[in-house]
Amino acid sequence: MAIANFAQQTVPDAETYVPPVADYAFLLGEAFGTDVVARATGNALSAADAGDALEAAGEFAAEVFAPLNRSGDQQGAQLVDGNVRTPEGFRDAYKSFAEAGWVSASVAEEAGGDGLPGSVTAALSEFWNASNAAFALCPALSHGAIRAIQANASDELRAAYLPKLVSGEWTGTMNLTEPQAGSDLGAVRTMARDNGDGSWAVSGQKIFITWGDHDVADNIVHLVLARTEGAPEGHRGLSLFVVPKFVLDASGAPGERNSVVTVGLEHKLGIHASPTCVLQFENATGYLVGELNQGLIGMFVMMNEARVGIGVQGLGLADRAYQRAFAYAHNRVQGAVIGLPAGTPIAGHPDVRRLLVSMASRISAMRAFSVLVGDVHDRAESDGTGALAELFVPILKSWLTEQAVHISSDAVQVHGGMGFIEETGAAQHFRDARIMPIYEGTTAIQSNDLVGRKVLRDGGQTLGQVFEMIREQIAALSATGDALAARVAERTERAVAAAERATQALLGFASSPRDAYAVSVPFQELLATLIGGWMHAMTATAVLAHGERTADDARRLDEADFYSAHHLVQVHALAETVAAGEIGQ
């Protein structure tokens, strides 16, 4: 691997966010062997068309959202006289965001949006989250609410709420968690009583409600899980309700304030600018979404949307932390660098360079996987990739969010002691990242879903298809005849074989579920790490088809080589762990 010429590199300022537009142009138009945007849209749009949108989105993220990230963290959201005030600049930024059409861009056409394919909305989501993760949560929750209402609500409710949600004039939330329930939704106690006029009176307390109250939009549409009188116990007795902050008047405009009180704001480790609320519902007016006792079915649409979105949030934050560390390392001069001239910045130290390439190689793999997942979801109905789409969701959510923590921690390490000081900004990324493997289903919840519903249930058949796809990619990479390709292909093949052995061991635990679930997180990590190698094999194959290689091409090949040597090899250790099952009492 060649040593970079540090003296000739152009390095952005640490406070400058640089959207990876060129990487997405490569992924959308070339890396997967086809124009995935054209394929998803029936040639109505192309990767080049998407590139224009991404250029504009990247400028907005860098110029409007990014400058508010640090100040928003320092000011935080404030609860004043029962109402939440967002940090300075947030109201104007959100208004600009909505008016520019960025909320509707990621919404399906049947719900009134622009219908951009999932591969493109993955890129948009990365930009928003990299530039300001706390801010990006607001439209992300709205997108989930839109999906749930579109999929389950009556025509009347859709007409009343979707247009304003899609335009961004109103925002949406998801109200699941309660103090006594946590992730156990079967313990939800919030009650809804029939008013006899088509509305319901909703009473109860919800906690951890992201953007549950704020001042950036005219209304907030809460989607609330609640029980009804006489409903079955547990999950089967939950129904879903729309409960607006302001009840709509006869004209459909926000009217009287509903009986929803913001009791308090959570005091959090990170994402301080995102108002995470405790909400008290006191006979608040709500409207049933879908059928009685089918609330989880309606909410799961929103939850799945949120899980993918939070995964990409992890990707965005990881890249922002990496960019800051890269800038610092290429400007900071300290100590003599082995084999390089005096005055070489710390990026030249072998271990600092190892950290930086390690971070970059994981981010590139994660980014490619997010595009793959978006594309598979786009084709789920037409190409029958629904089972693959379902398999990939828990892997994406867990891997990208766990890596956000690891990569933002590595970014602090690159900064040395200055990384532990708030003024460099590195600490904020680490603090912000820590919630991501927890909310919208912890890593263990994702792995239980993966193992129980996606692998054991079908005897590993869908996962077997993934292994076949990886082997096809290995063959294509090997066929290039390149020496680097041969190394990467050989390491990837050995990793697939280890993953297959681990899968057989897991399937052998079918009669002893404690063994299977005791190693579900390591198994999930194993698959994610393997998929990262697959993504690098794919991108390396595309790069090696180029006649004349660019600097980006050289970087992508270096990252593929590094990932296969430093990260893909972890599959073998994880396979040993999976085969061991539960150990001890």
Image (tube, rainbow, N blue to C red):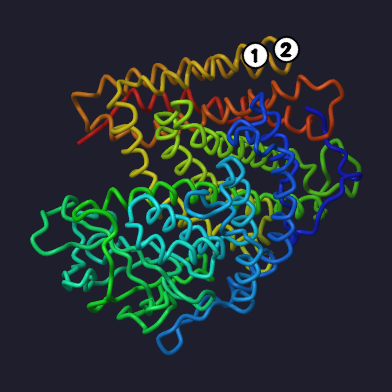
From the viewer's perspective, is residue 68 above or below residue 293? Answer: below
Residue 91 at x, y percent in the picture:
59, 76
Which residue bears the numbered disc 1?
Answer: 476
Residue at the (47%, 19%) spot, across then down: 467
Residue farthest to the left? 230
Where, quadrant-wise, is the C terminus in this rendering?
Answer: top left
> From the viewer's perspective, is residue 203 above or below residue 257?
above
Q: Name the secondary structure under disc 2.
A: loop
Front-lying residue, 170 or 159: 159
* Left or right for 169, reference 28: left
Q: Quadrant of the N terminus?
A: top right
217 or 74, which lies in front?
A: 217
Residue 339 location in percent, x, y?
A: 86, 35
Residue under the image location 54 percent in, 39 percent down: 374
Q: CA distance from mark 2 to mark 1?
A: 7 Å
Three-letter code for the amino acid on which mark 1 is drawn: Ala
Confirm or deny contact between disc 2 and disc 1 (CB under 8 A).
Answer: yes
- Whether residue 290 sits left or right of residue 7 in the image: it is left
Residue 313 pos. (x, y %): 54, 52
Viewer-side residue, 182 vs 227: 227
Mark 2 — residue?
480
Image height check: is 540 above or below 125? Answer: above
Place of residue 17 in the rendered image (x, y in percent of width and height, measured from the top left): 72, 57
Q: Residues within 10 Å of mark 1 (few under 14, many from 20)?
A: some
Mark 1 residue element: helix
- The answer to whether residue 231 is left or right of residue 305 is left
Instruction: Tell me, for residue 49, which label it has, or none.
Output: none
Q: Residue at x 60, y 74 (%)?
A: 90
Q: Quadrant of residue 95?
A: bottom right
